[in-house]
Amino acid sequence: MSSISSQSGKTVPRLLLDLVRYDPRRSVRGHNILTDPPPQFEENRVPPSTIAKGSCRHTLMIKNTQSLTPPLDSRPDNTTIYKVASFCQDCRCHVDLVVDFQNDPWKAGPCPNEDFPLHHLLHVPQHAQDRTVISEPLSPDGETLEHAFRCSAPSCPAYVTIRLRPPRLRPEHIKLLTDKTLLQARFDAAISADPSREGLRLASPSEALSILRRFILDSLDPKSGRVKFPARNKRFITAFGTDCDELLDRLGFSYTGSENKGGEGAWNLPRPDVSPDPLNKNAHQLLLEDVVEELLVLAWQRTEAEKQGIATLIYQPVPAMRDFERSLGSIGYDQAPSARRNVDLTKEEHPYYASLGAVGDFSDALLGFAYDRQAECDPINVPYYFEALQDLAQGRQSEMLQTKVATLASQGQLSRKDIARAYSYFGFDPKHAGAITDDIIVSQFQSRLPDVGPSQTEEMREVLRTLGRSRKSRVLEQTASNMIETYSHALAWLGAEEYTEDEFIIAMFTIKVDEDSNNITIGRQALSIIADARRSEHLHSFLVSGQPPQARMERKEALRMFGQDEDAKIDLDNLETYYQLYKDDPSVNKGDFEKAYACLKNESHARRDSMMNVETSKSPPSESPVGLISNGATCYLNSLLQYYFSIKPLRDLVLDWEAHEASMTQGTTMREGEVISADQIRSAQKFTGRLQELFKSMITEPRNTVTPHEDIAFLTFLKHDALVRPANESTAVEQANLTNAAHDPEAEPLVDSLNAGSNSASQVVVQDNMTLREAAEKAARQQQD
Ligand SMILES: [Zn+2]
Ligand SMILES: [Zn+2]
């Protein structure tokens, strides 16, 4: 365990709860409930027990003679040291707690205080005595264990030492004092040694225990004046006989033979150096004091009948827990309303509490504090603590904690589950996270990328970002973030759709950036791609100025400014001309005129894009129409048809063909002195109709290709003669259109742009004597040049 950079701790109530369950005699192999962090909780798995079967849940009673407890209403300062000595009524182990505030004069703000309502204690593994301290009198194989903790609060000097000693009286000693057969044998021996001696009485076990206790109490009290007693003392001889000598020796009793010839031997009481200072008692005094406590408890635990008539047997133990709490400043800590009672040791709380170094009755605020301390002291395991907090917040239905969780999540905090899910997403076992390199993850990501659609791509990047954050890997984060390249990806990144309006695109962008300011670069990238793809003034303006364009002009009003009625279709070239013509006219309001121009230009772009953007959901709008599937040996025709399509005025004309159809069928004479047959017209109309069908399907076809109707090839090539007049004449269709267009104000731009040229693909001069095909071919040649 790393003790420097990342270490789990526990608050005082947790430490005390673990302390009363810490039974070194029966510890779980490899786990120390007092000093080790609890095993991390795994859902759907029974948590491993941290408490071995048969462990004692200590009932700790105070040993006043060895304790230095806080005076009432006192606050510790840099001269303070507390000691609470206790022992367990049940297993008779001795537990000392020393809280020392003297070890760092620079730390002058001990807990509890406003920022740190409780000590948060970190185990000090390098503590000099954090090991077995071998052998004190009476317990040759007993061990004294000592563990140290320091408070994690920066200004708190608290240094806590917990010392555990096994019982002083070992089972064989207790048997010597309480085995009725042995006591009977001692009585019998005394009688047979001196059958005439009066007043001999069989000692009960509680009497034996009490007599020994009395002797030791006398030895610890210099004022008692007792130093020895005759070895033939009636009560002594029946209680201890001669087979307890070894025990008495160990306690410091000594036997002296008779000074006078024929006189009696005597037992001298132990003579420890007695000190009243709880912090400065020598081992012998401590041993005797401990034995006194143990003997009293052992005697008290005998049957009522046996205890009767023993005047000295008064036992009024005081639980030590309150003094532990006072010394550690946890008394009256903030508890959850439903739990303002003693911690119920019989009921296991959720393991998440232990992981947070907390206990189940913590108030929500205190639970939040426990999380914060763990997160600060043990950064490596924050995702796990966050998971614990999340779960407890939900379990408690605590608004306060849920808000805290939401805030942390919005700051990018990940839970262990989030991270495990991210590894699993890429097919890795989260358990082996440590062995998986960034490179392996990147290559896994990149190998999957081509197989998924745009929305899944974004999801995959998000998962990669999660791994990047959890591993603090810039490589992963960059791989996840730096690659918005297409319109659909940009939309997917924002969570937007094709039809999402610009205003909402901006709103989504703002949310993303608010969520995480690191999103700004990639967010602008996405916005810029969308703005370009949509030719959106709105988005461009937002990118430049941080604001959408102000007060956009209504279409109707804009049209009016351009002298058009409401139903007019906007033509970009026309618009351009009009704009150039009037932009310097002093009679127009220049600002409004600009706005109207921008509004109509935008609409005109949008309309053209919707016509051209034939594969809207798969790629950004482009000028290229869908491909055509070849009808046998007609790839030449196909490329020609594609080229026709790319000439905007021609395309518009064909698509809007019905508007001109009527005028064409009315007469057969299309040009001075020349007659076109009805068949020729029908054939031309059929061709145009097929062409229109094809163009429409090229626009609406969701697939990448369409198959031209075979009539097109037939009409274009095989019936070529039917469409054109011999000797340098226009086709009926084209001539009809061109003638017609001359009188049709809407169609005028066709003539203008075809003849005058513009900056579009329609840079071709159409001559009267050209066929449609020839005109297109010429256009193609010119473009190649
Ligand atoms: Zn115990
Ligand atoms: Zn503290």
Image: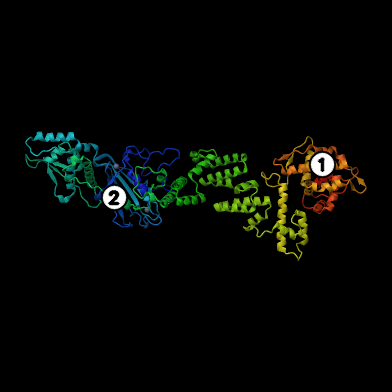
- What is the CA distance from the residue labelled 2 to the residue labelled 1? 106 Å
In terms of image quarters, where does ligand 1 lie? top left
Residue drawn at (67%, 43%) of the image = 618
Task: Report if residue 543 is visible in the image.
Answer: yes
- Residue 122 position, x and y percent, is 38, 48
Q: Foreground: 223 or 435? A: 223
Secondary element under disc 2, as helix, strand or loop, is strand
Question: In the rendered structure, which amino acid carries the disc numbered 2?
Answer: Val
- Residue 136 position, x and y percent, is 25, 42
- Residue 336 position, x and y percent, is 39, 50
> Which quarter of the picture shows residue 170?
top left
Picture colour scheme: rainbow
| Horizontal relation, residue 106 to residue 754: left or right | left
| Horizontal relation, residue 280 to residue 721: left or right | left
* Res. 687 mark: 1
**Which residue in the protein does label 2 denote?**
84
| Horizontal relation, residue 162 to residue 435: left or right | left
Question: In the rendered structure, which amino acid carries the disc numbered 1?
Answer: Phe
Task: Report if residue 640 is visible in the image.
Answer: no
Q: Residues within 10 Å of mark 2 (few under 14, many from 20)?
A: many
- Residue 672 position, x and y percent, is 92, 49
Q: Foreground: 461 or 435? A: 461
Residue drawn at (74%, 59%) of the image = 560
* Res. 602 mark: none
